[in-house]
Amino acid sequence: MARIAVIGAGMGALAAAARLAVAGHRVVVYERTDTYGGALRRLERDGFCFDTGPGLLPLPAVYRDLFVKTGKEPLERCVELVQVDPSSRHVFADGTEVSLPNASRAGVVAALDEALGSGTGERWGDFLVRAREAWDRTRRPLLEEPLWPNWQVLAGREPYPAAPRKRLLRTRRAGTLAEVAAWELRDARLAALLESHAVRYGLDPRSTPASAAVLPYLEHAFGTWYVRGGLRELARAVYERCVARRVEFRFGAEVAGVREKDGRVSGVELADGTLAEADFVVAGVAPGTLDRLTAGTGVRGDGEVPPQPPAASRLTVLLALRGGRPAGTAHRTVVHTADREAELEALSGTAARDLRPTVTIMRPDDPALVPGPDHEAVALSAVVPALPGRPFEQHAEHMIDVAERAVPGLRDRILWHEVRTPAHIADATGAEGGAVPVPALAAAGGRLLHPSNSTRVPGLFAVGGWAHPGGGLPHAGMSGALVAGLIVEGPDFRGSQ
């Protein structure tokens, strides 16, 4: 039985802790805040409840596997999963609207043809076929296996296939997501639909590799799911699974440093000076924090993936509304920006004072979130630059104005609202500027890969969204599985089965 210290109680760290405890190790989690879940937090006020982090769960199989591997009680006995249908409603700049069925290619094709015109559905359906090919080529190395030592193969190879050009006896290979939209979709609204999956993570589709086609494919193939009571309930269930497997938690315990002895990790030092010995240390922290904990000794070593571009953050406006949720309301509505170029420039930081972003509206059909049937809890979110100290609150009014395009009379229903800025994300996760990590993507010279879970220091591992395989709830859960496999089975571990 090894002694394992886990730094942080984010979802990746919790997933690793549960798996390691089941393998017979003594696991202690040190969390600097007073609760678990990382970005999966909740705000409660006057009988209203809101998720302040992600609101939907793609690829729930990752957490189903976690619960199967850590006990006999499956995930569905611990939380109630609801498949959201429609998957999303989209309001485009020209006023066109479309609601996309969940996990139904035929349904999506028919909905697009009806709303956007004949032929649009077929083009989107053909795109999904190519996106599936990219997914099949990258699923194992980018999600289910430790980062390859020869990761440069992933960095240089574009897995998104070339598309045939009609009336010409040749194909054309897109290098970026914007090129996929322009060359293959050939409709501004389909382009907005595709590019929104990259913009959601603060990625500029003009430079994001075509391999990012896997992001919409992942939602299409595996569906979009809601956890009854909010995604905070998923964090609770994973935490309780850890406790049931005798993982110890020390909240309000900030780790000040990672200790080494004889060329190997030996434990952690807490901010109060306490030393906790450990045979392994699992760090679920942002890169800057890991550097500080290791005194800048370069734990990543030579040959690591290139530094990632600056990450973006999120601005969220929580609305307590009078009046119940109308029947047939979509859970998620995306109101696309009327000025794509301005949105992308703002994300790059070159025009950050004039934010006019795409706004996502979450309207869960969940009585547990409201004080009664005559009220509704709504969350608006937008991607913003991760700029420390920026007063993003001023943009909340614009987001409400945008949301009224999809929810007429919204302002008249507001009882109160609260704004959650990148500073709140930074407080919860420790990431500078409230930055949110993106999922690992192939091609692009490796700049969208994440550092490996193992480090230069024997016994020190990295877990969570800032390590392979990157950001997003499924990826964080998989990072926990990969770290547990590397510790339990050793460096010969070849990935999740």
Image: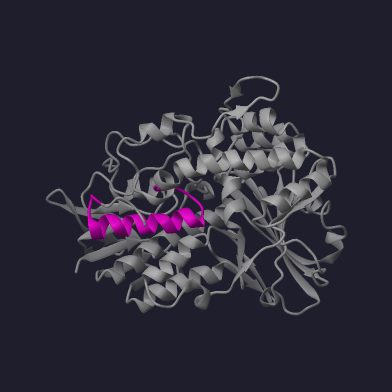
Which corner quadrant holds the N terminus? bottom left
Q: Please say whether residue 223 is one of the residues in the magenta stretch.
A: no
- Relative to 92, residue 21 above or below: below
Residue 433 at x, y percent in the picture: 52, 47
Which corner quadrant holds the C terminus? bottom left
Along the line of sight, which residue is nearer the eye, 48 or 225?
225
Rendering quarter of residue 340: top right
Residue 134 at x, y percent in the picture: 52, 39
Q: Outermost residue, left direction?
A: 262
Color theme of the render: one colour
Q: Looking at the magenta stretch, what is its main secondary structure? A: helix
Give me the residue at 30% from left, 64% from top.
272
Q: What stretch is highlighted in magenta?
A: 467-492
Q: In this view, does 434 lie to the left or right of 392?
A: left
The reply to whether residue 37 is visible in this rendering is no
Residue 331 at x, y percent in the picture: 71, 62
Give me the residue at 71% from left, 51% from top.
106
Q: In this view, does 422 lie to the left or right of 401?
A: left
Q: Please say whether residue 476 is one of the residues in the magenta stretch.
A: yes
Q: In this view, does 295 lie to the left or right of 170?
A: left
